[in-house]
Amino acid sequence: MDLRKGFPRSMGVTLDGYVHLARMIDKCRAVLAGTEGEYIYPCPMDDRLMGFAGLTAGQFTAAVKSHQTDEAVIQWFRQTAKPHKPADIEEWNRMMLSRGPTTQEKQASFNTYRDAVDPSRTDLTTWADLQDLEEGRIVPRRA
């Protein structure tokens, strides 16, 4: 899998109701294939999803390795992950998509990454938007 040709999917892509799951599957597959390039799996965002789902990186990696399709991974995820009410998943999704830098140091890193891609995009405040911008996706201007 060539991560520069449309992969990994955006954090905002939802699989089985969860944001970031599709992206995490893509990155895990790339690591297994040795084609991850500069992408990191597991990264802190992956850790957040796995923590919410009650899974470890080892469990998830083994599942992706043994399940060839997204649907098969999703089926495993449904059977293995900690169950959550739909409202709790939606709240978690909103938190993930609205998450921005939480310290001055992280804000400085965020600004450095953003400025390397497009310094005019001072409207961006979330990691999800910054990832999309960096990966060449259209990110609407924020008020």
Image (spheres, grey):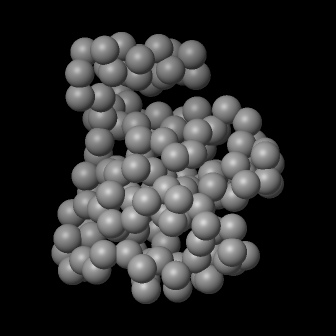
> Which sits in the foreground, 27 or 17?
27
Q: The N terminus lies in which quarter of the figure?
A: bottom right
Q: Position of residue 137 (x, y in %)?
A: 60, 44
| Residue 138 seen from this side | no
- Decide: is 127 above or below 9: above
Q: Residue at x 51, y 66 (%)?
A: 59
Q: Residue at x 32, y 58 (%)?
A: 51
- Decide: is 1 above or below 70: above
Q: Position of residue 40 (x, y in %)?
A: 58, 39
- Decide: is 136 above or below 71: above
In the picture provided, is 56 more to the left or to the right than 102? right
Q: Position of residue 45 (x, y in %)?
A: 41, 46
Which picture quadrant has residue 32?
bottom right
- Decide: is 124 above or below 91: above
In the picture provided, is 47 more to the left or to the right than 100? right
In the picture provided, is 102 more to the left or to the right than 34? left
> Which sits in the foreground, 127 or 1?
1
Q: Residue at x 59, y 61 (%)?
A: 61
Q: Residue at x 35, y 51 (%)?
A: 48
| Residue 29 seen from this side | yes
Number of residue marks: 0
Q: The C terminus lies in which quarter of the figure?
A: top left
In the picture provided, is 128 more to the left or to the right than 62? left
Which picture quadrant has residue 125?
top left
> Which sits in the foreground, 131 or 61?
61
Which picture quadrant has residue 19?
bottom left
Q: Position of residue 28 (x, y in %)?
A: 63, 55
